[in-house]
Image (tube, rainbow, N blue to C red):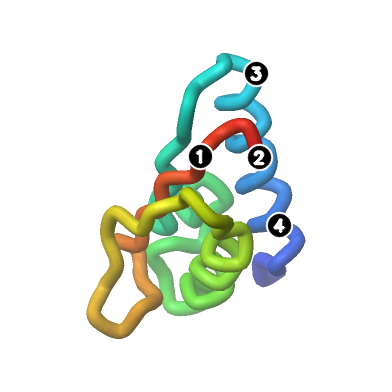
Amino acid sequence: MALTKDDFRRERDRRLAEATARRAPYVDLNAGELHRALGDYPGPDHRMPVCCDVLQQEQRLGDVILSQPLKGKGASLTIRFKLPR
């Protein structure tokens, strides 16, 4: 079964909550790592554009894109999320 936006949101939110609980000032989330943790990447049925959308939709003032592929969506997308949210 293909991964959904909700699957990526849950994993993103879990990682944000975990870093917040550690009282970290920020957390860097990478699309490739996030997708690999849930499976199906790399592979022919990957959902990398959906994973990237989920990360980008969480961006707020103070968050910084550390790395982004030329086309905007790909495994190298890395965003530093300022904590707490």
Q: Is residue 34 above or below residue 51?
A: above
Task: Estimate the x, y position of residue 15 in percent, counting from the top left.
Answer: 59, 36
- SS under mark 3: helix
User: What residue is pinned by disc 1?
Assistant: 82
Q: Are marks 4 and 2 in contact (CB under 8 Å)?
A: no
Tell me the SS state at disc 1. Answer: strand
Which residue is found at the position 49% from the left and 44% from the top? 81
Task: Name the mark nearer the viewer: 3 or 1.
Answer: 1
The answer to whether 10 appears left or right of 52 in the picture is right
Residue 44, numbered label = none
Amino acid tagged 2 = Arg
What residue occupies the far top of the structure in this picture? Answer: 22
Q: Is residue 61 above or below residue 47?
A: above
Near-viewer residue (70 or 74):
70
Q: Amino acid at mark 4?
A: Asp
Which part of the image, by quadrant, shows the C terminus?
A: top right
Task: Find residue 4 and report its image quarter.
Answer: bottom right
- How far, Cα to Cα, is label 4 from label 3? 21 Å
**Residue beneath disc 3:** 21
Is 82 located above or below residue 74 in the figure?
above
The residue pinned by badge 2 equals: 85
Residue at mark 1 to residue at mark 4: CA–CA distance? 22 Å
**How many numbered marks, from 0 up?**
4
Kindly identify which residue carries mark 4: 7
Q: Nearer the viewer, residue 29 or 83?
A: 83
Mark pair 4, 2: CA separation: 20 Å
